[in-house]
Image (spheres, rainbow, N blue to C red):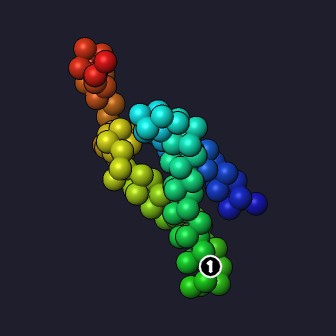
Amino acid sequence: MKKIKEILIRSVGLFLATFFGGTAIGAMAGDWVMGSLVGVGSAFAVVATMIGVSVAWSGTLSDQAVVNSFRAAVSKAAEDNEDIQKALDVQEDGSFDFDDIDELDDLDR
């Protein structure tokens, strides 16, 4: 039950981390819905692959395998999305301040 709860909580986080980036990319290409689905789907494909490899390799699903699979998905998403990378940097150093947020004047309009 603990693993299912862990997977569900991390799935919500992964969905939130990848949905909006996919929406932005899809909107630029003309279809925000498909962009969102591709963003979320590709992230969960990494999770499914990592969990599948772990189960195939060891025959069990360990807590560390669940953690590693979601971390791999976020890391992969961060390669393609600068905003996710910035969020990871703030998460790692633990010190958020408003200098981490772009000024509205700096945004492209």
Q: Quadrant of residue 49?
A: bottom right
Residue name at image x 57 percent, y 57 percent: 44
Q: Secondary structure at mark 1?
A: helix
Crowding at label 1, few (<14), some or many (≥20) Cα neighbours within 10 Å? Answer: some
Instruction: Give the residue type that dot 1 points to.
Output: Val
Q: Toward the viewer: 41 or 65?
A: 41
Residue occupying the far front of the picture: 30
Classify residue 30 as left or right of residue 8.
Answer: left
Task: Examine the rendered structure and indicate whether residue 47 appears above or below residue 15.
Answer: below
> Could you tell me which quadrant the C terminus lies in?
top left
Q: Is residue 51 above or below residue 23?
A: below
Report the number of discs: 1
Expressed as whole percent of the image width and height from the top left, the position of residue 12 reads: 61, 44
Residue at the top extreme, as displayed: 105
Q: Is residue 86 left or right of residue 65?
A: left
Rendered image quadrant of residue 105: top left
Residue shown at the point (67%, 51%) measured from the top left: 8
Residue 11 in sight here: yes
Name the quadrant containing residue 64.
bottom right
Q: Is residue 67 visible?
A: no
Instruction: Between residue 64 and residue 43, name the one nearer to us.
Output: 43
The N terminus lies in which quarter of the figure? bottom right
> Which residue lies at the image location 36% right of the left edge and 44% below the top edge?
81
Q: Residue at x 33, y 53 (%)?
A: 79
Drawn side of residue 82 relative to residue 8, left or right: left
Q: Which residue is mark 1?
A: 55
- Where is residue 37 drawn, in percent x and y? 58, 46
**Residue 74 in picture, x, y percent from top left:** 45, 53
Expressed as whole percent of the image width and height from the top left, the position of residue 75 reads: 39, 56
